[in-house]
Amino acid sequence: MVVRIANWMLRGIDATVDFICATSLLAVTAVVFFNAMGRYLFSFALVGAEELARLLTVYLCFFGAYVLLRRDGHVSVDIITLVVPAGLLRLLRGVVGMVAGVTMLYLAWYSWQLVGFSMRTGQQASTLPVPRYVFFLPVAVSASLMVVASVDKVVRAITNTLPPLPGWTDETVAADADKGKAR
């Protein structure tokens, strides 16, 4: 029951983050396009457009990193996954999840401190009428989400419920299992 609730919550978070990433990508494209059109066709620039594009890109990059972690889409050394047996691959993915979790916990801790400092000092963005902590917030939130995703990955590695890696078919997994039995 707890596992189903956790999976349901993670799928909800995933859908929300997917929406944030898609919206950020569309918005940064529109901002850059309209700012360029304004500059080159009408001789005016949108005030704060470059800073807004930078802010949206920060949101897109950090929340996109969470999405990639959940989907096993980060850069990896594929040759290792092709030569190790299934049991060792599961252990390896669990260890990678633990290292990622510890690293993201460190990043989350310090980025939340930076957000708090920025909130206390009342810093403002240079051209946008937003507080400066809005630029640091996606780092803190996404690092915290990546800690949760890493814990989920480690738990799935322990319970042998990890989904196959992207690009792996059922035949590939079966062949890998046979290769592991032959050793």
Image (cartoon, helix red, strand yellow):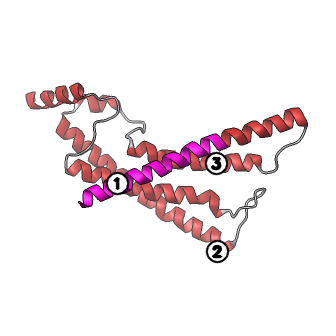
In screen coordinates, is 55 left or right of 37? left
Q: What residue is shown at x 49% (from left), y 55% (from top)?
A: 142
In screen coordinates, is 95 left or right of 103? left
Whether residue 76 can be seen here: yes
Q: What residue is shown at x 86% (from left), y 33% (from top)?
A: 40
Residue type at the position of mark 1: Trp
Badge 2 is on which residue?
120
The secondary structure that most of the magenta stretch takes on is: helix
Q: Residue furthest right?
A: 43
Quadrant of residue 9 within the rendered picture: bottom left
Residue type at the position of mark 3: Leu
- In what element is the residue under mark 3? helix
Quadrant of residue 37 within the rendered picture: top right
Q: Which range is magenta?
A: 1-27
- Earlier in the chain: of badge 3 and badge 2, it is 3
Q: For marks 3 and 1, give the CA distance.
A: 28 Å
Residue type at the position of mark 2: Arg
Q: Residue furthest left?
A: 182
Where residue 109 sits in the image (x, y, percent)?
47, 64
Q: What residue is shown at x 52% (from left), y 60% (from top)?
A: 140
Where residue 83 sits in the image (x, y, percent)?
23, 28
Badge 3 is on which residue?
56
> Is 85 inside the magenta-drawn segment?
no
Q: Quadrant of the N terminus?
A: bottom left
Q: Which mark is residue 8?
A: 1
Vertical relation: 79 (above or below) 64: above
